[in-house]
Amino acid sequence: DAAKGYVDSQVLEANIREFSETLYQKRTAKNLALFLDAFLNRTNLVDKLDKLTVDCLVAVGKKSSVLHTTEKFYEKLRESRDNPQKMVNSPILIADNVGDILGEAVRKRKI
């Protein structure tokens, strides 16, 4: 599907841009190549949701470039659970004013 490919390429570009801006000082050709390789060869978790049997917390920042993708992932997680009770301990957390939920939490904690 051409539209899906276009959206995927936009997401990839946004992720590369965010990565480059956040880690500019640490960026080397080798590190960028490793990042791109890992990103392009990542496992599609949506295809494996039916096998997920544990509770999970899905967390994302509201300013994150992957917010929409994370929300779609969570919707697929809900659809994969045959019983709504199984979602009780699997919430989604969308943090306001945050892009990188883990990276920014460390900085704010040290202040």
Image (tube, rainbow, N blue to C red):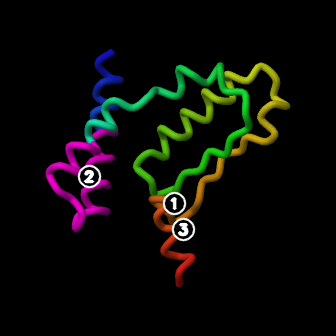
Vertical placement of 100 versus 77: above or below?
below
What element does badge 1 sit on?
A: helix
Seen at 59% across and 50% down, the residue is 59
Q: What mark, if any, has residue 102 been given in the picture?
A: 1
Does the residue at mark 1 contact the one at mark 3 (Cβ under 8 Å)? yes
Is 101 situated left or right of 30 in this image?
right
Q: Spatial distance from mark 1 to mark 3, Cα to Cα?
A: 5 Å
Q: Which residues are magenta?
A: 11-35
What element does badge 2 sit on?
A: helix
The residue carrying mark 2 is 17
- Local packing at callout 3 (Cα closer than 10 Å; few below 14, some 14-19, many 20+) is few
Does the residue at mark 1 contact the one at mark 2 (Cβ under 8 Å)? no
Vertical placement of 39 versus 93: above or below?
above
- Does the magenta segment cover residue 13? yes
Q: Residue furthest bottom?
A: 111
The residue carrying mark 3 is 105
What element does badge 3 sit on?
A: helix
Is 17 situated left or right of 74 in this image?
left
Please name the amino acid that badge 2 sits on. Answer: Arg
The quadrant of the image that shows the N terminus is top left
Q: Earlier in the sequence, mark 1 or mark 2?
A: 2
Q: Position of residue 58 (x, y in %)?
A: 62, 45
Is 91 situated left or right of 69 in this image?
right
Please name the amino acid that badge 1 sits on. Answer: Leu
Seen at 22% across and 68% down, the residue is 25
Choose between 65 and 43: the one closer to the eye.
43
